[in-house]
Amino acid sequence: MTTIVDPLGTPVPVYNRSGVAIVSVSATGMSGSDGASIPTVSGHTIVLLSCNIGPISNNIYAVLPSGTEIGDLLEVYSVDISQGIPLIVPASGETINSGHTDQISMNSGRGALFRKTSSTNWQVLWGVS
C-alpha cells in the first residue's frame, strides 16, 4: 500500500490502482478552458461535484482528467448545484464519445459514469447529457 496526496491535499491510500477513491471537487470557471480539473488517483474514482461557489451562474465547469490510463472509470455525482449547473468537459486534445459530445450537463443532480477508452477519448456509460 502506498499513501499519496491527491491534488486537493487529501491523503488517499492507493492499492496498485485497483482501489476506489472518493474525491470532492468544486466546479469553477465560466468556460471549459478554466474549469476545475478532476483528479484521478485510482482506476475507479468517484467525484462528488459541487457548484456552491461565487455568484449564481448558468454554467460552471469541471474538466475530465488527462493522462489517465485506458480503462479507468470516473463516476461523477452532483452534490450541490445551488449556484449553477455543472458541466463536464474533456481535457484539451481529448473527446467525449468520439467527439459527438463536447460537454455533459449534471443539471438533474444524477450522476454520470465515464470510461477512458483510448488515449484521447472518454465514453459515457450512463448519465445525463
Image (spheres, rainbow, N blue to C red):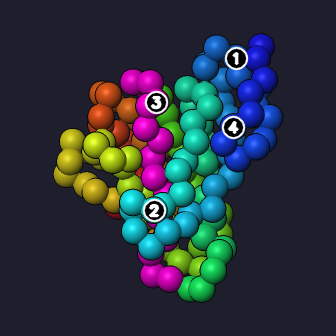
**Residue 82 visible in the shown view:** no
Q: Amino acid at mark 2?
A: Asp
Mark 4 lies on residue: 6
Q: Which residue is mark 3?
A: 68
Number of the label disc, if any, that sits on residue 15:
1
**Percent position of residue 43, x then y:** 55, 26
Q: Quote the CA–CA distance across marks 1 and 2.
A: 31 Å
Residue type, label 1: Tyr
The answer to which of 54 and 110 lies nearer the viewer is 54
- Element under disc 3: loop
Residue behind mark 2: 34
Q: Provide the residue span drawn in magenta.
A: 57-71
Magenta residues: mostly which secondary structure?
loop
Element on which disc 1 rests: loop
Q: Can you tell which of label 2 and label 3 is closer to the viewer?
A: 2
Q: Is residue 104 left or right of residue 76?
A: left
The quarter holding residue 94 reads top left
Q: Nearer the viewer, mark 3 or mark 1?
A: 3
* 1 or 2: mark nearer the eye: 2
Whole-percent x, y for residue 17 in the image: 61, 20
120 vs 75: above or below: above
Q: Give neighbour class at mark 3: few <14, some 14-19, many 20+ (Cα, 10 Å).
A: some
Q: Quadrant of the N terminus?
A: top right
Q: Residue at x 57, y 36 (%)?
A: 40
Question: Which of the two discs, 2 and 3, labels the residue nearer the N terminus?
Answer: 2
Mark 2 or 4, closer to the camera? 2
Q: Earlier in the sequence, mark 2 or mark 4?
A: 4
Mark closer to the chain start, 3 or 4:
4
